Amino acid sequence: MPGTETTYLRYVALGDSQTEGVGDGDDVTGLRGFADRLAEHLARHEPALQYANLAVRGRLAAHIHTEQLAPALALRPDLATVVAGVNDLLRPGFDADEVCAHLDAMFGALTEQGAQVATITVPDLSRVCPVARPLVPRVTALNEGIRRTARRHGVIVAETALHPVAGDPRLWSPDRLHAGPLGHERIAAALAHALRLPGSDDTWTHPLPPQALPTGVRAVTAELRWLAGFLGPWLLRRLTGRSSGDGRTAKRPLLLPVQADRRPVTDG
Protein backbone atom coordinates (compact mmCIF):
# COMPACT_ATOMS: atom_id res chain seq x y z
CA MET A 1 0.00 0.00 0.00
CA PRO A 2 1.36 3.44 -0.84
CA GLY A 3 2.55 5.78 1.86
CA THR A 4 1.71 9.43 2.29
CA GLU A 5 4.69 10.38 0.08
CA THR A 6 3.06 8.86 -3.02
CA THR A 7 2.30 11.46 -5.69
CA TYR A 8 -0.33 10.87 -8.37
CA LEU A 9 -0.32 12.97 -11.53
CA ARG A 10 -2.83 11.12 -13.76
CA TYR A 11 -6.05 9.78 -12.25
CA VAL A 12 -8.55 7.87 -14.42
CA ALA A 13 -11.93 6.64 -13.13
CA LEU A 14 -13.74 3.67 -14.71
CA GLY A 15 -17.25 2.60 -13.79
CA ASP A 16 -20.99 3.12 -14.01
CA SER A 17 -23.42 5.67 -12.59
CA GLN A 18 -21.79 5.93 -9.17
CA THR A 19 -18.45 6.87 -10.72
CA GLU A 20 -20.18 9.18 -13.20
CA GLY A 21 -21.67 10.95 -10.18
CA VAL A 22 -25.41 10.24 -10.45
CA GLY A 23 -27.09 11.40 -7.24
CA ASP A 24 -24.61 14.23 -6.70
CA GLY A 25 -25.84 17.12 -8.84
CA ASP A 26 -27.90 16.66 -11.98
CA ASP A 27 -27.66 16.67 -15.76
CA VAL A 28 -28.45 20.40 -15.91
CA THR A 29 -26.00 21.78 -13.36
CA GLY A 30 -23.52 18.93 -13.81
CA LEU A 31 -22.67 15.79 -11.88
CA ARG A 32 -19.90 15.72 -9.31
CA GLY A 33 -19.66 12.33 -7.57
CA PHE A 34 -17.00 10.52 -5.57
CA ALA A 35 -14.47 10.39 -8.42
CA ASP A 36 -14.62 14.17 -8.93
CA ARG A 37 -14.35 14.63 -5.17
CA LEU A 38 -11.36 12.29 -4.94
CA ALA A 39 -9.69 14.16 -7.81
CA GLU A 40 -10.26 17.43 -5.95
CA HIS A 41 -8.66 15.94 -2.82
CA LEU A 42 -5.66 14.82 -4.86
CA ALA A 43 -5.34 18.20 -6.57
CA ARG A 44 -5.25 20.07 -3.26
CA HIS A 45 -1.93 18.33 -2.60
CA GLU A 46 -0.72 18.01 -6.20
CA PRO A 47 -1.94 20.93 -8.37
CA ALA A 48 -0.43 19.33 -11.47
CA LEU A 49 -2.91 16.43 -11.26
CA GLN A 50 -4.88 15.63 -14.40
CA TYR A 51 -8.11 13.65 -14.21
CA ALA A 52 -10.34 11.73 -16.64
CA ASN A 53 -13.67 10.05 -15.90
CA LEU A 54 -14.72 7.37 -18.40
CA ALA A 55 -17.78 6.13 -16.47
CA VAL A 56 -21.23 5.88 -18.05
CA ARG A 57 -24.41 5.13 -16.14
CA GLY A 58 -26.18 1.82 -16.65
CA ARG A 59 -23.05 -0.04 -17.71
CA LEU A 60 -22.54 -3.67 -16.68
CA ALA A 61 -19.09 -4.97 -15.74
CA ALA A 62 -18.66 -6.41 -19.24
CA HIS A 63 -19.41 -3.02 -20.80
CA ILE A 64 -16.97 -1.24 -18.52
CA HIS A 65 -14.30 -3.79 -19.44
CA THR A 66 -14.84 -3.65 -23.20
CA GLU A 67 -15.60 0.07 -23.52
CA GLN A 68 -13.44 1.76 -20.90
CA LEU A 69 -10.31 -0.31 -20.27
CA ALA A 70 -8.55 0.40 -23.57
CA PRO A 71 -9.13 4.19 -23.37
CA ALA A 72 -7.98 4.13 -19.74
CA LEU A 73 -4.75 2.31 -20.63
CA ALA A 74 -4.13 4.80 -23.43
CA LEU A 75 -4.20 7.60 -20.84
CA ARG A 76 -1.47 5.80 -18.84
CA PRO A 77 -2.81 6.62 -15.35
CA ASP A 78 -0.69 6.28 -12.24
CA LEU A 79 -3.95 6.01 -10.25
CA ALA A 80 -7.20 4.39 -11.39
CA THR A 81 -10.44 3.58 -9.64
CA VAL A 82 -12.53 0.71 -10.98
CA VAL A 83 -16.05 0.32 -9.57
CA ALA A 84 -18.34 -2.19 -11.28
CA GLY A 85 -20.92 -4.85 -10.53
CA VAL A 86 -23.93 -3.14 -8.96
CA ASN A 87 -25.88 -3.03 -12.21
CA ASP A 88 -25.06 -6.70 -12.71
CA LEU A 89 -26.40 -7.79 -9.33
CA LEU A 90 -29.71 -6.08 -10.11
CA ARG A 91 -30.15 -8.30 -13.20
CA PRO A 92 -31.88 -11.73 -13.05
CA GLY A 93 -28.88 -13.56 -14.49
CA PHE A 94 -26.30 -12.20 -12.05
CA ASP A 95 -23.09 -14.25 -11.88
CA ALA A 96 -20.52 -13.02 -9.34
CA ASP A 97 -17.75 -15.07 -10.95
CA GLU A 98 -18.43 -13.51 -14.34
CA VAL A 99 -18.39 -10.00 -12.89
CA CYS A 100 -15.14 -10.69 -11.07
CA ALA A 101 -13.57 -12.10 -14.22
CA HIS A 102 -14.09 -8.69 -15.82
CA LEU A 103 -12.70 -6.99 -12.72
CA ASP A 104 -9.72 -9.34 -12.81
CA ALA A 105 -8.96 -8.36 -16.40
CA MET A 106 -9.21 -4.65 -15.64
CA PHE A 107 -7.25 -4.83 -12.40
CA GLY A 108 -4.56 -6.91 -14.10
CA ALA A 109 -4.13 -4.71 -17.16
CA LEU A 110 -3.98 -1.47 -15.18
CA THR A 111 -1.60 -2.72 -12.49
CA GLU A 112 0.67 -4.37 -15.07
CA GLN A 113 1.00 -0.98 -16.74
CA GLY A 114 2.09 0.49 -13.41
CA ALA A 115 -1.09 2.11 -12.09
CA GLN A 116 -2.16 1.95 -8.48
CA VAL A 117 -5.75 0.72 -8.63
CA ALA A 118 -8.42 1.24 -5.95
CA THR A 119 -11.98 0.01 -5.65
CA ILE A 120 -14.80 -0.22 -3.09
CA THR A 121 -17.10 -2.86 -1.66
CA VAL A 122 -20.89 -2.62 -1.97
CA PRO A 123 -23.00 -1.79 1.13
CA ASP A 124 -26.05 -3.84 2.10
CA LEU A 125 -28.67 -2.27 -0.18
CA SER A 126 -31.55 -3.67 1.89
CA ARG A 127 -30.74 -1.28 4.74
CA VAL A 128 -31.80 1.62 2.54
CA CYS A 129 -34.24 -0.17 0.25
CA PRO A 130 -36.04 -3.05 2.04
CA VAL A 131 -37.32 -4.53 -1.23
CA ALA A 132 -33.68 -5.28 -2.06
CA ARG A 133 -33.43 -7.83 0.77
CA PRO A 134 -33.36 -10.81 -1.66
CA LEU A 135 -30.19 -9.30 -3.14
CA VAL A 136 -28.17 -9.61 0.08
CA PRO A 137 -26.55 -12.96 -0.89
CA ARG A 138 -25.56 -11.44 -4.22
CA VAL A 139 -23.97 -8.44 -2.51
CA THR A 140 -22.05 -10.80 -0.22
CA ALA A 141 -20.82 -12.88 -3.17
CA LEU A 142 -19.81 -9.79 -5.14
CA ASN A 143 -17.89 -8.31 -2.22
CA GLU A 144 -16.06 -11.57 -1.57
CA GLY A 145 -15.10 -11.69 -5.23
CA ILE A 146 -13.95 -8.06 -5.22
CA ARG A 147 -11.70 -8.68 -2.22
CA ARG A 148 -10.28 -11.90 -3.66
CA THR A 149 -9.57 -10.36 -7.06
CA ALA A 150 -8.11 -7.21 -5.51
CA ARG A 151 -5.67 -9.25 -3.40
CA ARG A 152 -4.47 -11.04 -6.53
CA HIS A 153 -3.40 -7.77 -8.15
CA GLY A 154 -2.47 -5.59 -5.18
CA VAL A 155 -5.55 -3.42 -5.62
CA ILE A 156 -6.55 -1.25 -2.66
CA VAL A 157 -10.09 -1.80 -1.36
CA ALA A 158 -12.02 0.87 0.51
CA GLU A 159 -14.32 -1.22 2.70
CA THR A 160 -17.44 0.92 2.54
CA ALA A 161 -19.55 -2.22 3.10
CA LEU A 162 -18.24 -2.82 6.62
CA HIS A 163 -19.42 0.34 8.36
CA PRO A 164 -23.02 0.87 9.57
CA VAL A 165 -23.07 4.50 8.43
CA ALA A 166 -23.23 3.24 4.83
CA GLY A 167 -26.85 2.25 5.49
CA ASP A 168 -27.92 5.69 6.72
CA PRO A 169 -30.60 6.96 4.27
CA ARG A 170 -29.11 10.45 4.49
CA LEU A 171 -26.11 9.21 2.50
CA TRP A 172 -28.34 8.07 -0.35
CA SER A 173 -30.24 9.89 -3.07
CA PRO A 174 -34.06 9.73 -3.21
CA ASP A 175 -33.91 6.83 -5.69
CA ARG A 176 -32.21 4.65 -3.02
CA LEU A 177 -29.90 3.20 -5.67
CA HIS A 178 -27.28 5.93 -5.83
CA ALA A 179 -25.34 7.78 -3.21
CA GLY A 180 -26.40 11.36 -2.54
CA PRO A 181 -23.92 14.24 -2.17
CA LEU A 182 -22.97 13.24 1.38
CA GLY A 183 -22.67 9.60 0.32
CA HIS A 184 -20.36 10.49 -2.56
CA GLU A 185 -18.32 12.62 -0.16
CA ARG A 186 -17.98 9.63 2.19
CA ILE A 187 -16.95 7.28 -0.64
CA ALA A 188 -14.27 9.74 -1.77
CA ALA A 189 -13.05 10.04 1.81
CA ALA A 190 -12.99 6.24 2.15
CA LEU A 191 -10.84 5.92 -0.96
CA ALA A 192 -8.54 8.73 0.16
CA HIS A 193 -8.12 7.01 3.53
CA ALA A 194 -7.47 3.61 1.95
CA LEU A 195 -4.88 5.22 -0.33
CA ARG A 196 -3.33 6.96 2.69
CA LEU A 197 -3.54 10.33 1.01
CA PRO A 198 -2.41 13.42 2.93
CA GLY A 199 -5.24 14.95 4.91
CA SER A 200 -7.31 11.75 5.03
CA ASP A 201 -8.53 9.91 8.12
CA ASP A 202 -11.28 7.55 9.29
CA THR A 203 -13.94 10.15 9.99
CA TRP A 204 -15.85 8.82 6.97
CA THR A 205 -16.74 5.79 9.13
CA HIS A 206 -18.37 7.91 11.85
CA PRO A 207 -22.17 7.81 12.24
CA LEU A 208 -24.31 10.85 11.53
CA PRO A 209 -26.18 12.62 14.34
CA PRO A 210 -29.36 10.77 15.41
CA GLN A 211 -32.47 11.61 13.41
CA ALA A 212 -36.05 10.43 13.81
CA LEU A 213 -37.35 8.39 10.88
CA PRO A 214 -40.78 9.11 9.35
CA THR A 215 -43.63 6.98 10.64
CA GLY A 216 -47.31 6.47 9.91
CA VAL A 217 -48.78 8.41 7.01
CA ARG A 218 -45.47 10.13 6.28
CA ALA A 219 -43.69 6.80 5.93
CA VAL A 220 -46.39 5.35 3.67
CA THR A 221 -46.43 8.49 1.53
CA ALA A 222 -42.65 8.32 1.13
CA GLU A 223 -42.85 4.68 0.02
CA LEU A 224 -45.58 5.39 -2.53
CA ARG A 225 -43.64 8.35 -3.90
CA TRP A 226 -40.56 6.16 -4.29
CA LEU A 227 -42.52 3.38 -5.99
CA ALA A 228 -44.05 5.77 -8.50
CA GLY A 229 -41.06 8.01 -9.06
CA PHE A 230 -38.17 5.56 -9.13
CA LEU A 231 -38.97 1.86 -8.94
CA GLY A 232 -41.68 2.00 -11.60
CA PRO A 233 -39.55 3.76 -14.24
CA TRP A 234 -36.59 1.47 -13.44
CA LEU A 235 -38.72 -1.65 -13.95
CA LEU A 236 -40.12 -0.23 -17.19
CA ARG A 237 -36.59 0.23 -18.56
CA ARG A 238 -35.74 -3.36 -17.64
CA LEU A 239 -38.88 -4.71 -19.33
CA THR A 240 -38.28 -2.73 -22.51
CA GLY A 241 -34.56 -3.48 -22.68
CA ARG A 242 -33.56 0.15 -22.30
CA SER A 243 -30.76 1.59 -20.15
CA SER A 244 -30.34 4.92 -18.43
CA GLY A 245 -27.01 5.16 -20.27
CA ASP A 246 -28.37 4.71 -23.79
CA GLY A 247 -26.81 7.31 -26.07
CA ARG A 248 -24.44 8.59 -23.39
CA THR A 249 -20.67 8.86 -23.50
CA ALA A 250 -18.02 9.57 -20.88
CA LYS A 251 -18.38 13.00 -19.28
CA ARG A 252 -14.61 13.59 -19.09
CA PRO A 253 -12.82 11.34 -21.62
CA LEU A 254 -9.55 13.28 -21.59
CA LEU A 255 -7.05 14.03 -18.85
CA LEU A 256 -7.68 17.60 -17.74
CA PRO A 257 -6.54 19.79 -14.83
CA VAL A 258 -8.72 19.80 -11.71
CA GLN A 259 -10.18 22.72 -9.80
CA ALA A 260 -9.56 21.90 -6.15
CA ASP A 261 -11.37 24.71 -4.37
CA ARG A 262 -14.72 23.00 -3.65
CA ARG A 263 -15.64 22.40 -0.04
CA PRO A 264 -16.97 19.03 1.15
CA VAL A 265 -20.58 18.48 2.06
CA THR A 266 -21.26 18.87 5.78
CA ASP A 267 -22.88 16.07 7.78
CA GLY A 268 -26.42 16.58 8.95
Image (cartoon, rainbow, N blue to C red):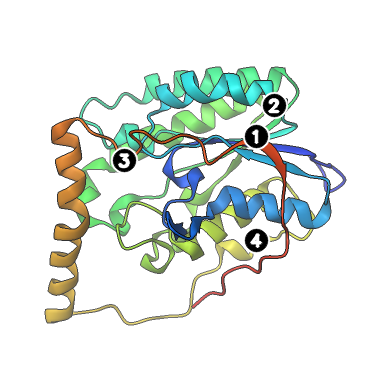
Of marks 3 and 1, which one's residue comes earlier in the chain? 3
Q: Where residue 18 appears, x then y in whole percent?
A: 45, 46
Q: In the rendered view, does 218 fall on the left or right side of 62?
A: left
- Whole-angstrom CA distance, mark 2 to mark 4, is 31 Å
Instruction: Please identify the quarter of the rendering in which residue 105 is found.
Output: top right
Find disc 3 in the rendering and name its residue.
Answer: 244
- Whole-angstrom CA distance, mark 4 to mark 1, is 31 Å
Q: In the rendered view, does 152 fall on the left or right side of 129?
A: right
Q: Where residue 261 appears, x then y in whole percent?
A: 72, 65
Q: Which of the two residues, 68 or 151, is positioned nearer the viewer here?
A: 68
- Whole-angstrom CA distance, mark 3 to mark 4, is 34 Å
For badge 4, the amino acid type reads Asp
Please tell me how crowded label 1 is: few (under 14), some (14-19), or many (20+) other residues with Cα within 10 Å: some
Front disc: 3 or 4 = 3
Identified at 49% across, 44% down, the residue is 20
Of marks 3 and 2, which one's residue comes earlier in the chain? 2
Find numbered disc 3 in the image and state the secondary structure of the residue it sits on. loop
For badge 3, the amino acid type reads Ser
Find numbered disc 2 in the image and state the secondary structure of the residue it sits on. loop
Front disc: 4 or 1 = 1
Please tell me how crowded label 4 is: few (under 14), some (14-19), or many (20+) other residues with Cα within 10 Å: few
For badge 2, the amino acid type reads Leu
For badge 1, the amino acid type reads Leu
Find disc 2 in the rendering and name its residue.
Answer: 75
Q: Is residue 98 above or below residue 260?
A: above
Front disc: 2 or 1 = 1
Of marks 3 and 4, which one's residue comes earlier in the chain? 4
Front disc: 2 or 4 = 2
Find disc 1 in the rendering and name its residue.
Answer: 254
Identified at 48% across, 22% down, the residue is 67
